[in-house]
């Protein structure tokens, strides 16, 4: 997830009335499903660590996507690649007659600038700039492992319905799932499940911040900065003027807003007036409408900066996602299954790894308790995810499992290190089992699917009509590439 998912704004919202839970699977089936996940763990671990090594960023995950597709094809899934205008996106399906459609989300993109070895001390990997600081290497591999185990269960018990895995690229800023939804690829899904690496085990169904992401590119006039500065019009001056105005604006935005940026192009040399410059913005708020209003104000700041510096500006929207809509019908089912999964034990070496990483945390860092955290719903997370658009169009729920040392912030070198370790893999196994048990229950619990859909309809309101925050923009397949380097 974008931003530090661990930083919660504890703004408790009311939870929906607790629905009747589906009956648990018979013990024999439950044990068999988890045994199948265990049997597939070596392959899952190999895939997860290989994707960790690839560390490919958004829309560039060619090898990572191909690896997961290969695993699914070998397991008998029908795979359609390159969907929704995204070369690294795919939909894998297994259908056994007429019945519900249950989906699993799989991610596999890394973050730029977070190169780190799988060691508990800060050590960059030579020749690598990216790092899996959000654990998406584990995320995709575990979702695939879960699907393979469920397919075996469906065949063994002649379970009717269709199981799908959605290979969703560019979660980190590219809004890959938005394009899957817009293309109608999820419209017939009865329930969608997902998971995320984290610092503890929890099935809480939190909300996230809606977000719009985009790049403001300024164009000026180059000149010799010493010999003829009067002939130049600095695009970098425009970027700095825009940033100054937005920073002044922070005093006058709703408290829950988040606005942040990086300068992705600031020129080449101090003695050349920069002809082009670029700044990449994220604008967030729990309310999708407020995100649009904030974007309009930021755009005006950009236009004012261009006017004041004698430059021009263009805005390229890269991403835009809804907030995450909880579904307690599905969430409580995932919670019960998470409690049924035996949690992993750590070896002395793994315990030492965790302890060493924790020495890098600031004093007073909060640590979550052990075991499974109590169920909660409606808390607002300070991060964003493109699962939000899925959750507004399909009943959706997720689970978090311990893959990092307690206290680890997301998007950090510590998260990269643990995501490439056996600690991360053990957490992924917990997730794969929880997903698999929940999917299996949903296939044989039509009443639960009806209740989940009714809850979705109630939460989003009778007049809801899906309109993507991306409007008509398509995927920016090069958003992780620095235009200045082209």
Image (tube, rainbow, N blue to C red):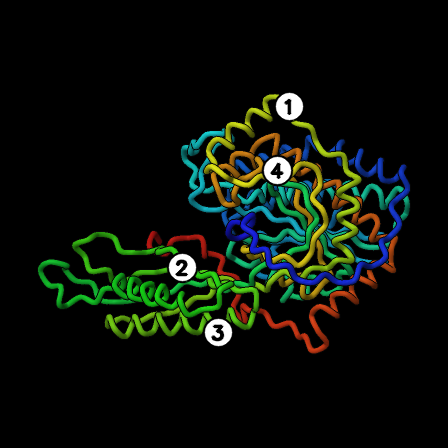
Q: Where residue 1 sits in the image (x, y, percent)?
A: 56, 51
Q: How far apart are labels 4 and 3 at the CA level?
A: 37 Å
Q: How far apart are labels 3 and 2 at the CA level?
A: 18 Å
Dot 4 corresponds to which residue?
403
Q: Is residue 278 left or right of residue 174?
A: left
Task: Give the mark, 4 or 3, whose residue is nearer the N terminus.
Answer: 3
Residue 83 in sight from this viewpoint = no
Dot 2 corresponds to which residue?
280
Q: Give neighbour class at mark 1: few <14, some 14-19, many 20+ (Cα, 10 Å).
A: few
Dot 3 corresponds to which residue?
293
The numbered dot on residue 347 is 1
Q: Where residue 221 sits in the image (x, y, percent)?
A: 22, 66
Compared to residue 434, the image places residue 422 above or below, namely above
Q: How far apart are labels 2 and 1 at the CA level?
A: 43 Å
Pointer 3 with pointer 2, Cβ within 8 A: no
Residue 404 in sight from this viewpoint = yes
At 51% from the left and 69% from the top, the residue drawn is: 291
Q: Which residue is at the far left?
A: 227
Q: Where residue 390 sits in the image (x, y, percent)?
A: 66, 61
Q: How far apart are labels 4 and 2 at the CA level?
A: 30 Å
Question: In the structure shown, which secondary structural element does the residue marked by tag 3 occupy?
Answer: helix
Task: Give the mark, 3 or 1, whose residue is nearer the N terminus.
Answer: 3
Question: In the structure shown, which secondary structural element does the residue marked by tag 4 occupy?
Answer: loop
């Amino acid at each position: 997830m974008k931003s530090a998912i661990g930083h919660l704004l504890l703004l408790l919202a009311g939870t929906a009335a607790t629905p009747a839970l589906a009956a648990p699977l018979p013990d024999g089936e439950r044990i068999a499903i988890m045994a199948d996940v265990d049997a597939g763990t070596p392959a899952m671990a190999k895939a997860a660590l290989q994707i960790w090594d690839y560390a490919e960023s958004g829309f560039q995950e060619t090898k990572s996507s191909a690896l997961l597709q290969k695993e699914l094809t070998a397991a008998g899934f029908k795979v359609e690649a390159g969907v929704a205008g995204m070369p690294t996106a795919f939909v894998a399906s297994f259908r056994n007659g007429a019945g519900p459609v249950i989906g699993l989300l799989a991610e596999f993109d890394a973050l730029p600038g977070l190169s780190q070895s799988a060691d508990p001390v800060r050590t960059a990997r030579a020749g690598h700039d990216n790092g899996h600081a959000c654990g998406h290497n584990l995320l995709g591999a575990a979702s695939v492992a879960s699907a393979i185990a469920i397919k075996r269960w469906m065949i063994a018990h002649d379970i009717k319905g269709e199981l799908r895995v959605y290979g969703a690229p560019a979660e980190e800023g590219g809004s890959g799932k938005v394009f899957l939804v817009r293309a109608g690829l999820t419209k017939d899904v009865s329930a969608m499940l997902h998971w995320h690496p984290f610092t503890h085990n929890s099935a809480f169904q939190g909300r996230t911040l809606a977000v719009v992401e985009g790049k403001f590119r300024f164009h000026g006039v180059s000149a010799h900065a010493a010999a003829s500065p009067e002939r130049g019009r600095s695009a970098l001056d425009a970027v700095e003027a825009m940033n100054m105005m937005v920073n002044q604006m922070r005093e006058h935005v709703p408290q829950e807003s988040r606005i942040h940026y990086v300068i992705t192009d600031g020129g080449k040399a101090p003695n050349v007036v920069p002809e082009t410059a670029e700044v990449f913005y994220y604008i967030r708020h729990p309310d999708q409408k407020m995100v649009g209003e904030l974007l309009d104000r930021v755009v005006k700041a950009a236009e004012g900066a261009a006017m004041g510096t004698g430059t021009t500006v263009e805005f390229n929207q890269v991403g835009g996602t809804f907030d995450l809509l909880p579904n307690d019908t599905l969430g409580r089912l995932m919670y019960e299954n998470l409690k049924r999964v035996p949690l992993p034990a750590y070896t002395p070496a793994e315990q030492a790894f965790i302890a060493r990483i924790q020495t890098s945390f600031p004093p007073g860092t909060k640590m979550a308790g052990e075991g499974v955290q109590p169920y909660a719903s409606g808390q607002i997370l300070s991060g964003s995810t493109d699962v939000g658009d899925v959750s507004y169009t399909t009943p959706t729920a997720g689970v978090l499992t311990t893959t990092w040392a307690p206290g680890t912030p997301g998007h950090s070198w510590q998260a990269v290190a643990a995501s490439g370790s056996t600690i991360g893999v053990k957490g992924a196994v917990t997730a794969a089992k929880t997903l698999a048990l929940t999917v299996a229950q949903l296939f044989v619990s039509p009443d639960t699917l009806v209740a989940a859909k009714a809850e979705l309809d109630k939460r989003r309101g009778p007049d809801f009509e899906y309109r993507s925050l991306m409007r008509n923009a398509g995927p920016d397949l090069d958003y992780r590439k620095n235009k200045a380097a082209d």
